[in-house]
Amino acid sequence: MPYNGSVARLNFGFLSAARVRRWLHDGEFDVIHIHEPTSPSLGLLACWAAQGPIVATFHTSNPRSRAMIAAYAILQAALEKISARIAVSEYARRTLVEHLGGDAVVIPNGVDVDFFARAQPKPEWQGGTIGFIGRIDEPRKGLPVLMKALPKILAEHPQARLLIAGRGDEEEAVESLPEDLRSRVEFLGMISDEDKASFLRSIDLYVAPNTGGESFGIILVEAMSAGAPVLASDLPPSPRSSTRAAPANSSPTRTPTPSPRQPYASWATPTAWPTCAAAAAPTYDASTGRRSARTSSPCTRR
């Protein structure tokens, strides 16, 4: 289903609803945590069927969503059952407030920082490499923007290579490039999580030329967790409140640590799982009516 510049893969219908009801009944959960309860998928079905406390996380950043406005009457019954709300960014929170009412705690998506920081680089992905991860044929990921800039990049750095990981039409992706430059682009196809971590540890620069429609650019945090310098589009929903993107002309600060990439990894620390879990715990307590004795977290509260 096309939505917000992407294609959403939805599970919805009588069979899915029956499975969700059975799963909730058998689980006897203390708290149900649902992601995107307004999407016509398992999250909304769970919200309709759940009987206990519900915590909902909102990801969508779309300040002009006609679909969300039109669907409000249908969604209202489900939204009224939510006990506590989380938004992954300030712009996701703003979308929630403007279209659905209510408010939310802002807690960024969690990342396993150590998983990326400890990955082993691969020699074949090193040496003047620029990295891009994303669906090739999804316009909002911005690969055409990077392809348009690539001739100028190669004119300045003839030995540079662009490595692309993701599914899509490879021939269509390079058709705008002069034929003599196409050999500087290498397609890796879909890669595993382990290879993604190695990829981000290997490249010299990660480029995220997104054009919009993202509420939290988690790949930026993953790249910084791996210590990669990041060049990203200056879009409002980027995780700027939690991390700092590296300027295009910057280089890692030299420190006594073994790797000069380490400063970039340290910028991703606010989105590490322990930090986000500590921020989310009081929200769970609030949903069940318990008073939290936990200390405050660095995440924004509204």
Image (cartoon, rainbow, N blue to C red):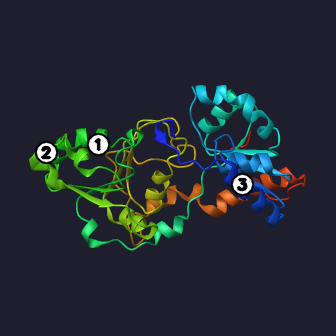
Please name whichever residue, 7 or 155, is drawn nearer the observer in this view of the structure. 7
Whole-percent x, y for residue 258 in the image: 40, 73
Which residue position holds label 2?
Answer: 155
The amino acid on which the numbered mark 1 sits, given as a three-letter code, is Leu
Of tags 2 and 1, which is closer to the observer? 1
What is the number of the mark on residue 279? 3
The amino acid on which the numbered mark 3 sits, given as a three-letter code, is Ala
Whole-percent x, y for residue 209 in the image: 37, 42
Disc 3 residue crowd, few under 14, some 14–19, many 20+, Cα 10 Å: many
Quadrant assignment for the C terminus = top right
In this image, 74 relative to 230: left or right? Answer: right
In this image, 56 relative to 116: left or right? Answer: right
Answer above or below: position of 144 versus 274: above
Does label 3 or label 2 sit earlier along the sequence? 2
* Image label count: 3
Answer above or below: position of 141 versus 289: above
Q: Where is residue 125, by image quadrant?
A: bottom left
Whole-percent x, y for residue 12 in the image: 64, 47
Which residue position holds label 1?
Answer: 146
Instruction: Quote the CA–CA distance across marks 3 and 2.
Output: 47 Å
Please name whichever residue, 29 or 283, is drawn nearer the observer in this view of the structure. 29
Please name whichever residue, 71 or 85, is drawn nearer the observer in this view of the structure. 71
Whole-percent x, y for residue 3 in the image: 52, 37
Please name whichever residue, 13 or 204, is drawn nearer the observer in this view of the structure. 13
Identify the element where label 3 is drawn: helix
The amino acid on which the numbered mark 2 sits, given as a three-letter code, is Ala
